[in-house]
Amino acid sequence: MVCASIKSSFLDRIEKLSLLENPMAEEKLLSVTEASAILNKPEVTVKRYARESLIPCVKVDGNVMFSEAAVQKYMEIEKRLK
């Protein structure tokens, strides 16, 4: 049982890494500035969301980028919590 759990965890990590290698290839990527405008939040807050993994992000040429879908999903979740 433990081996199956470890194997599952390992496969999950590999899947996440493969997603990072091809950062949301078909998704429109948004900069921190664009995401903060959509979310109506300060840039520093959006950067914190990225750091805390509240919104998935990738680094492209040293810049933090968000998929438009991830930003929209965060907005939907935030609305439900209000």
Image (cartoon, rainbow, N blue to C red):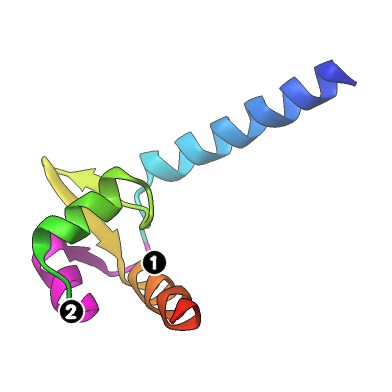
Residue found at the very far top of the displayed protein: 3
Q: Is residue 32 left or right of residue 50?
A: left
SS for tag 1? helix
- Amino acid type shown at disc 2: Asn
Q: Position of residue 45 (x, y in %)?
A: 18, 59
Nearer to me, 81 or 17: 81
Q: Which span is picked out in magenta? A: 26-39
Residue found at the very far front of the displayed protein: 82
How many C-alpha atoms fall within 10 Å of the one at disc 1: few (<14), some, or many (≥20)?
some
How many C-alpha atoms fall within 10 Å of the one at disc 2: few (<14), some, or many (≥20)?
few
Name the residue tied to disc 1. 70
Displayed quadrant of residue 55: bottom left
Residue pictured at 20% horizontal, 66% vertical:
30
Residue pictured at 39% horizontal, 41% vertical:
20
Q: Is residue 33 left or right of residue 58?
A: left
SS for tag 2? loop
Name the residue tied to disc 2. 40
Q: Position of residue 27 (x, y in %)?
A: 35, 67
Quadrant (top left/top right/bottom left/bottom right) for the N terminus: top right
Compared with 23, 3 (above or below) is above
Residue found at the very far right of the displayed protein: 1
Disc 2 + disc 1, Cβ < 8 Å: no
